[in-house]
Amino acid sequence: MMDENHNAYHFIPNLFPHLITAMDQFYGVNQPFDEGQLIEWEQIQQIHLEPIEDKKMKILITTFWDYPFIGGLQNYITSLKDGLENLGHSVNVIAPNHFPADEMETLRNKYSEEFTQFFNKRYGSFNPKILHNISKMYSFYMMLKNIDLAEYDIIHAQDRYTANVISILNQYNQIPLLFTPHGFMTQNRLKFNLMEKGSVEEIYFSAIDSQAVKNANHLIILCDVFRPILKNLGAEEYKMTTVYTGIDFGEWNIQKEAKKSESKTVITCVSRLRPRKGHKYLFKALALIKDKLKNVEVRIVGDGEMKKTLKKQVSELKLKNVTFLGSRDDIPKLLSESDIFVHPTTSDTLPISIIEAMFMNQAILTTNCGGIPEIINDNFSGFIVEPANPKQLAEKLSLLLRKKSLRNELAGNAQAFAQQHLTVSSMTKKIEEIYLSLV
């Protein structure tokens, strides 16, 4: 009689052997993999995502997250796609939500059960986060395997998960595969205590990180701060190129609107209301200079899980000039009415909101996080303070509120840098050069 775990033992090692090897080492398991082969390549029925015209290059952009959606990653993908198409290339984007939801759910449930059996038998237990992730990866693989990768000249993975999955499907075609990490992956989760050091989760997700780097022919990184992290994962210097995120301001040519009152100064903060965005430190800073806020309006733009907590903090600090505007789709207009842009983040890579503020001629006050110091030159195109430091925030805010000429100087320098280095055109031309060097 066939073992009830037979299927699980067949497919898991063959698709993700690096993950099982890492977990085996953690649990001290020496049991060899089953030699069965699940993938029968000749039986894969390949389909086209959609007809695409015969242009310079045919490019596939992959993401493990829903697309289109709201957020920095999705904006990046859209800008990259539009920019490449403007250069004459054909671009497809593929994400899990592009497949029928009921089929994806059925697959996830099926493989969740099989992986549960596999982990319980091999390790005597299972980790829920690992189970969820590997089931979703395998489900995505099962849908992706019907796509004809041979029609593409370039594949560009926008996360570590698709960089793992797509490489399995690409092993026969050997299409140049690029990987762009949009976060600091496992290292970041450890830093913020979202994952226990030395845990099986660290072992598993670190293996995903390392394999994503190994699979990539080239790494396009958002800022130089990624370099040491990726080197620790095995990346070679010559295989990494920094390309700063570009945004399209063709439709954002909005002049500074005349203020209702020239004496009023507007401070704007645009970001999700999440713990790591540092709003609470901004409010503490405002409380320190409350006597200097008589003709100041503070606009908090965005929504998120911290909204209730932050509103309570504002009330307790009696900051009557702070207004929560929620999610807005008129950011250019709001910034055109603003004088100072504050981004008090405690963890970030290269925030799009800062780039938007640069284009919109804002005096920028932000923190020393991620790649921010690579685009904001402290005391030249903005002010940079240490994260989670209300005192420093208060000092710089006070200076900006007091000196309009300084605001104008910083804003002008930031805008000039953005116009030269942070456009979609600049970004896509640099990425195009990398693509062409690989085909």
Image: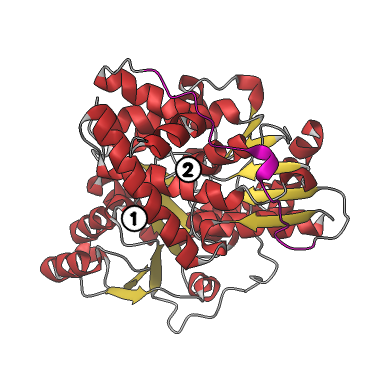
Rendered image: mark on residue 388:
none
Main SS of residues in magenta:
loop
Q: Callout 1: helix, strand or loop?
A: helix
Image: magenta residue range: 32-51
Name the residue carrying label 2.
Answer: 372
- Residue 87, quarter of picture: bottom right
- Residue 415, quarter of picture: bottom right
Vertically, is 297 above or below 277?
A: below
- The x, y position of residue 119, in whole percent, is 29, 34
- The x, y position of residue 96, in whole percent, is 52, 57
Residue drawn 56% across the image and 25% down it: 214
Residue flagged by tag 1: what amino acid is it? Leu
Out of 115 and 27, give the one closest to the viewer.
115
Q: Callout 2: helix, strand or loop?
A: helix
395 on left or right of 67: left
Vertically, is 235 above or below 125?
A: above
Name the residue carrying label 1.
Answer: 397
Q: Is 48 part of what is drawn in magenta?
A: yes
- Mark 2 Cα-neighbour bin, 10 Å: few <14, some 14–19, many ≥20: many
Decide which of tag 2 and tag 1 comes sooner along the chain: 2
User: Which tag is nearer the camera, tag 2 or tag 1?
Assistant: 2
Q: Is 275 part of what is drawn in magenta?
A: no
The answer for how far apart the CA atoms under marks 2 and 1 are is 18 Å
- The x, y position of residue 147, in whole percent, is 67, 51
Residue flagged by tag 2: what amino acid is it? Ile
